[in-house]
Image: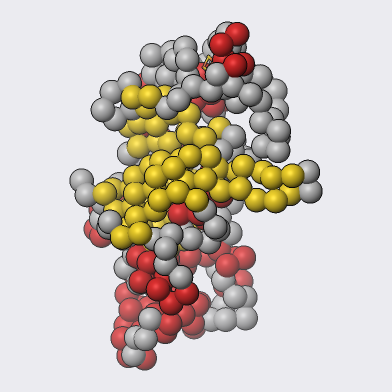
Amino acid sequence: MTTLLDAENISVRYASKGGWVQAVSDVSLQLNTGETVGLVGESGCGKSTLGKALMRLLPAEGHLRLNGDDVLALQGKQLLPFRRQVQMMFQDPQGSLNPRQRVGTSIARPLQVAGWSKAAIQARVSHLLEEVGLPASAATRFPHEFSGGQRQRIGIARALALEPNIVICDEPVSALDVSVRAQVINLMRDIQQRSQVTYLFISHDLSVVEYIAHRVVVMYLGRIVETGPTAEIWQAPAHPYTRALLAAAPVADPRHPHSDTLLEGELPSPLNPPAGCAFHTRCPHAQPLCKQQRPQLKSLTSERQVACHFHLS
Ligand code: SF4
């Protein structure tokens, strides 16, 4: 597999009333051609901030390369080719689609900005609508005329308009009913099989992540605590936080192996994160060392990493 996006030691901090919030700390990850990487963790763990930083929607420190080119150095118009290759898809397409604009106009917008001719835009919009399972006539209607699932299909069509290599999807199906959610996820998988597009799939819904993601990155208070192939992590999570997240997720299979560990307590404030291992205030396996020394992310195998002094597998 070829590495498309290579993020190295990405950190994001912002000013808040109480001081500086370190929302993302030293995160390194790679996105490869045609794969889906699930980015999971509780709300407030920094996963959406990381997604925006990878899109260059937020200032970040570190190194970010797309096909080897330095992305953080790009400014103004230099960013246009990057924006063509990396698109974003949001939870609420209703919020990102202009309610007074016909669907076709919304999908056409990125194509217009890229300088496509009228005829080429029309043909591309029809093709995109067909690809996401909507009739070409949908182009002449307004967003409110569609259901939530159909609007998300429109969101997918717009994100794919310029044939990006990467789509960063922030909770793309969280607002949908379970049955519609499955349809949209299957559509995303079909599109990936046809086009080899890469997804970074940000979600708190672990059942969806298990279904769609080849690899998983688990974040806690702005840092990666575990990463590896989805099936392996689901079978034997190495970090107590991953184990607790999986135990808290609704699962169809009652023989699920991690139902013995429940996640207790609140996520600490990122304004004042605990010293040592940030998870020690909630970890059932915490030892005195955990309060003093932050565990580094270390390799368990060539594909798995964990940040825990006393990891579970
Ligand atoms: Fe728990 Fe210690 Fe591991 Fe942190 S380092 S997850 S506190 S055992």
Q: Is 54 left or right of 14, judged from the image as shown?
A: left
The image quadrant where one finds ligand 1 is top right
**Residue shown at 35% from the left, 65% from the top:** 85
- Which quadrant of the structure image shows residue 282? top right
Does residue 296 appear in the picture of this structure?
Answer: yes
Q: Is 188 left or right of 270, judged from the image as shown?
A: left
Q: Is 62 left or right of 142, judged from the image as shown?
A: left
**Residue shown at 69% from the left, 45% from the top:** 20
Residue 224 coordinates in the image, percent (x, y): 47, 34
- Which quadrant of the structure image shows residue 288? top right
Q: Nearer the viewer, residue 105 or 255?
A: 105
Residue 140 coordinates in the image, percent (x, y): 49, 83
Q: Nearer the viewer, residue 50 or 205?
A: 50
Q: Nearer the viewer, residue 191 or 114?
A: 114
Considering every residue shown, the one lying at the far bottom of the view is 118
Residue 183 coordinates in the image, percent (x, y): 42, 51
Where is 125 relative to 69, above or below?
below
Considering every residue shown, the one lying at the far left of the view is 1
Q: Is 227 left or right of 173, judged from the image as shown?
A: left
Does residue 128 appear in the picture of this structure?
Answer: no
**Residue shown at 46% from the left, 70% from the top:** 75
- Which quadrant of the structure image shows residue 130? bottom left
Residue 182 coordinates in the image, percent (x, y): 44, 47
Q: Quarter of the image for the C terminus: give it.
A: top left
Coloration of the structure image: secondary structure
Q: Nearer the viewer, residue 236 or 272?
A: 272
Q: How many marks?
A: 0
**Residue shown at 62% from the left, 42% from the top:** 22
Where is 194 relative to 267, above or below?
below
